[in-house]
Amino acid sequence: MHRMSWFAALLGGISLVFSWMPVRAQQAVPRWEATECDFEVFDWGTPVECGDLIVMEDRADPTSGTISLAVAIFRSQNPDKAPDPVVYLEGGPGGNALESMGAYFDMIFGAFVEDRDFIIFDQRGTGYSKPQLTCPEYTSLLYDILDDPLTPAQRRDRVVQAFQTCHDRLVSRGVNLDAYNSAASAADLNDLRQVLGIPQWNLYGISYGTRLGLTVMRDYPDGIRSVILDSVYPPQSNLLQTAPNAQRAFDELFNACAQDAVCNASYPSLGLIFTNTVQMLNLSPAQVTITHPKFDRRYEVQVNGDLLVRIAFSMLYAEWRIPEVPQVIVEVFQGNYTLLGRVLASLLYDEEGFSTGMMMSVQCAEEAPFTTLEEYQASAATFPDLRGFMDDAPNLGEIFFRTCDFWSAPPVNPVENLPVASAIPTLVMAGQFDPITPPSWAADTARYLTRGYYYEYPGVGHGASLSGECPQTMALAFLNNPLVAPDSSCIPDMPRPIFTVVDKSITLVPFSDDYMGVSGLRPEAWEDYGGGVFVRPGGEDAALYNLIIGEVSTTRVMRLITEQFGISTTIQPVSTRTTPNGMLWSLYETEYNSLSYDFAISEAQGMTYLVMIHYPPNERSALYSSVFIPALEAFSVQ
């Protein structure tokens, strides 16, 4: 399931192929055409071959044109590799599978390619496949209304109109929106296996990819050796019942914090604080300045309670973000929006490249026919603190039903609302904190799989198989022997979230450095290296810098920093902050070579000033609040 966070796509991710029109079939289809890879391939040791699968847009209409699906085959270098590859099924619907794979494949899926080839493709309507069902009209609107005090009804009207404009543009260019659904994508997969000459393969789906995997199991079971379903979205589920699923995940979080001595001491009554903060912000929204981390665009964002819910909901997807959620909630309650602004800016980047039109085509065909707006409203009304978030999501409430009225009208197939029964060996995985596809959906799916093995993994959210050594080891063991339940003895020993809290053991004391000409606060126990620099004892993994750079531009300062610390990534401002002495600071952040860096740069009276800190990523949230921000607030020139 696509992350239903604040944006469904990003301006910078829009790459709609405006010149595309359906191509009348001149050659036999389906067929394979070898191509250069559309994405940049880094030399990490796994060779990749790319190509396009050419298929009919509408298999029921022999006169329809063809479309192309971008495919990448990552080749195992094991001379004794298994003959049955793994094919990965991306989430969404509408997710871009291939764009970042050239850089991150080995990091994400490297363990799977040790024994098998690994196939990744952009589903019809997404990514590098043509046509792309992106909706820049919708994305642009989201940016336009960030700080616009529209009423909820006005906002929904404008979103629906944006989808209408997107729909009309796609149709005018010859796209048959009825042809973009799970059944059509399942047929694409069957064609891909045949044109590549693969007798058997293994399906591996996460989120909406599980819905696609189940559809393939139902419609084209031949040639499937085994299936991994992670964070399951089965046909019999009702996505528009997301409110109780979200509340379940929040309750899991609140209970986990209450049972953790450190978290409970720092954030007592977390659930009550969350409710009060949501209600408070909905009555009196806050204005927060954020900067897009990639495009260096600054936005004034009106943060209301619904947006706080949306951010917390999105953070529960990722195992590495879950420990920060209590801190975000409590700091916002206290009027501190620094961490929330950082998370919000990073979510902008995370959402790049999503095909919202593909999402609408799939879910208007597979969700809308089997429920009603009234049923949604009755469910959402039970959870009033979540209601505004649900109403604003494009695929959950009123916006969804109004859009589906004009988006497409494929024949309603009752099978799309029925569970899939199968004897294909299947590993079914779920995460404890998953806010969108709850463990109950996975357990219900496994009931209909006679060779299904179901496991819930503690401490993780959406995408359990990519959230630690234990679930990945079990997935690999299952692939090697799918007729035997994988050893699950590692599950009880999986780590629980180590919630980030302000380190109260750190005592800040005043300092004054005559050589550098600055004064402020520094951690009492950290060693004074002179010149406004303080380093945590036992190594240089954490250090604080208070510096006057001189008559040097901010651009030059950033170049000096990246050269000094060997940082090869481009660093862009993420927000601004005015300190009590009136200095206006631009805040920057990056992560490089196993360390997180935060910078604050201010230009005043021809001089440039720098406050900087670096630390291990897992300590970032705690030390950011307990050291960096107080040091910045206290920075002064003598």
Image: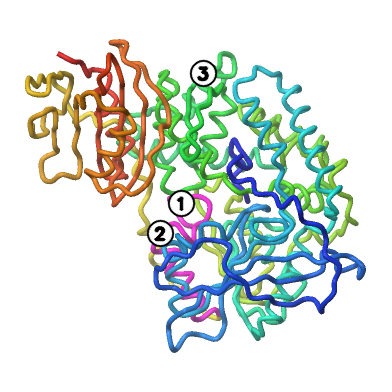
Residue denoted by label 1: 460
Position of 450 with respect to 186 (left or right) is left
The part of the chain drawn in magenta is: 457-482
> If you read the primary sequence from the N terminus, does the residue marked by circle 3 or circle 2 appear first?
3
Q: Are marks 1 and 2 in contact (CB under 8 Å)?
A: yes
Q: What residue appears at the point 29 percent right and 30 percent down from the top-left corner?
A: 502
What amino acid is found at the position of numbered circle 3 in the picture? Gln
Counting from the top left corner in percent of width and height, residue 183 is at 78, 64
Position of 616 with respect to 155 (left or right) is left
Q: What residue appears at the point 62 percent right and 66 percent down from the top-left corner?
A: 121
Q: Nearer the viewer, residue 545 or 253?
A: 545
Residue 397: image quadrant is top right
Position of 581 with respect to 440 (left or right) is left
Disc 1 to disc 3, C-alpha distance? 32 Å
Residue denoted by label 2: 468
Counting from the top left corner in percent of width and height, residue 257 is at 40, 37
Residue denoted by label 3: 287
